[in-house]
Image: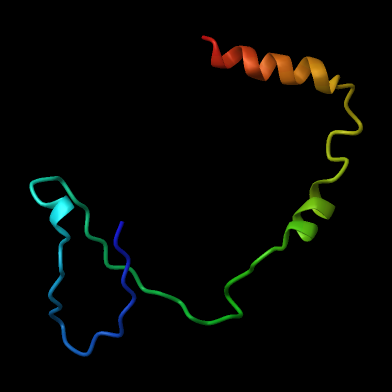
Amino acid sequence: MVREIIVPTHQEHTVHIPKEYLQKHVEILILPYDTDKKSVTEQTDDAIFSQTASILSDQNIDPVKWQRTIRSEWDR
């Protein structure tokens, strides 16, 4: 994967395509890149853990049985 963040000064930009992508289908996207720190919300592992801790505590779930059910879906 190639990712390049630029600040264009003209409407045209030349794209370098690596050799390993030649003769293959590639997708080229042009998206605005927001560098405003206020709009980016990064959550730490601790914040995510505290928000999701005990989320299933009100349900009667046997964790071992649930894990076996999930794993058995892989064998399908």
At horizontal 51% and vertical 9% (from top left) the residue drawn is: 76
**Residue that lies at the very extreme toward the front in this rendered image:** 19
Residue at x-position 79% and y-position 15%: 65
Above-or-below relation of 61 to 11: above
**Coordinates of residue 43 in the picture (x, y in percent):** 69, 63
Image quadrant holding the N terminus, namely bottom left
> Across the whole image, how many numbered discs are drawn on residues?
0
- The relative height of residue 72 versus residue 43 in the rendered view (above or below) is above
Q: Residue 2, image x and y in percent?
A: 29, 62
In the rendering, at what x and y percent does residue 50 appear?
Answer: 84, 54
* Residue 72: quarter of image: top right
Left or right of 62, for residue 24: left
Q: Nearer the viewer, residue 70 or 21?
A: 21
Residue at the far top in the pictured view = 76
Residue shown at 90%/22% (left/top)? 60
* Left or right of 51, for residue 76: left
Q: Which colour assignment does the render follow? A: rainbow
* Residue 54 in the figure: left or right of residue 19: right
Q: Residue at x 88, y 26 (%)?
A: 59
The image quarter containing residue 47 is: bottom right
In the image, residue 52 sits, relative to residue 16, either above or below, namely above
The percent coordinates of residue 36 (x first, y second) are 53, 82
User: In the figure, 19 relative to 57: above or below?
Assistant: below
Examine the image and state in which quarter residue 69 appears. top right
Residue reaching furthest left? 23
